[in-house]
Amino acid sequence: MTTVLWVNGQLVDPNEPAVSGLDRGLLLGYGVFETLAVENGVPFALTRHLRRLESSARKINLKLPALEDIRAGLDAALGEWNTAAGPQTRGRLRLTITGGVSPLGTSADPTRPTVLIAIAPAGPVRKLGSKTGARALLSPWSVNPHSALAGAKTLSYAAHAVLQQYARENNVDELISATVDGHLCEGATSNVFVESGGELLTPPLEAGCLPGITRELILQWGAESGLPVRAAQPGELPISILDDAPHLAITGSVRGIMPLTQIGSRELEPGPLTEEVAAIFQQKSALEVDP
């Protein structure tokens, strides 16, 4: 399997050590990251991802390298990827920036950030009209929308790893979490959409969910196409909606739009509005790699 790794200005062997044992990302989870799909050798919606990266960094007071330096690193890694794997190979790109190396202790001043860019093969997106989808369970853990890290994509990802492990142990693809006050929030690695009453709704950012790039584009492109797609009002989507919503879907930068075929013991079919929005998303994303 081809994997490309670029660290602090140079390509390195992905099987060799590349980060100091005193890196704040390793010791404290102090850092931010983005995961992007690479389509035909080009990262999709790169500008939006970099904008979210900057937003996450501001939340944890992490000073990022200059944007042109980040883009130069991405170009170098992508050039190597396209040579090694071929631009026809769909990829998963992970951009990680940590606080860098510093003395032990949380009060140490940040140093030069560590920048890592990894690219590896990714699976195909779901084809429209296929019966494939995802199975999900309600998570036994809740999300605190008032957390200092709510809505930020940081390296403090242990809670998400626990959710993913729980999902694997229960033979499902995703866990859907409620907020601590009982409202629908997000999946462990996805945003959630509910198709009900002729509308396609997703929880508001006030619920503490990640401001997903695919979520953002669905809301924008759906509205531009005159479809009833919107972010719900705070409190509009109680977690109990999972018990009777006719159609559900999850979204992410690599998986795209994926209907749920099962939530708990309840089986579901892809919703017609979900499929219509997915068709618009596929069409527009094929025409605009950096929308």
Image (cartoon, grey):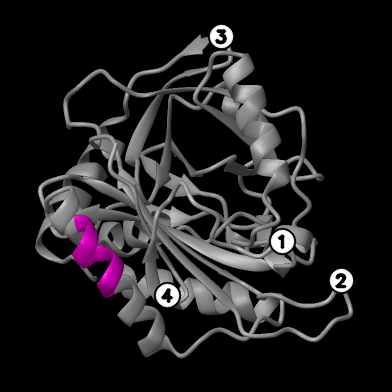
Q: Nearer the viewer, mark 3 or mark 4?
A: 4
Mark 3, Cα crowd under 10 Å, few <14 / some 14-19 / many 20+, is few
Cα gap from disc 3 to disc 4, whole angstroms: 39 Å
Which one is earlier in the sequence, the residue at label 4 or at label 1?
A: 1
**Magenta residue span:** 75-81
Q: Is residue 241 visible?
A: no
Q: Label 1 amino acid? A: Gly
The answer to the question of whether label 4 and label 1 lie on touching residues, with beta carbons closer than 8 A, is no
Q: Label 4 amino acid? A: Leu
What is the secondary structure assignment of the residue under circle 1? loop
- Residue furthest toward the top? 265
Q: Residue at x 75, y 67 (%)?
A: 22
Which one is earlier in the sequence, the residue at label 3 or at label 4?
A: 4
Label 4 sits on residue? 50
Q: Nearer the viewer, mark 4 or mark 2?
A: 2
Q: On screen, 108 above or below 153?
A: below
217 vs 58, left or right, is: left
Which one is earlier in the sequence, the residue at label 4 or at label 2?
A: 4
219 vs 129, left or right, is: right
**222, 146: nearer the viewer:** 146
Label 2 sits on residue? 104
Q: Label 2 amino acid? A: Leu
Q: On screen, 57 above or below 23?
A: below
Q: Which mark is residue 21?
A: 1
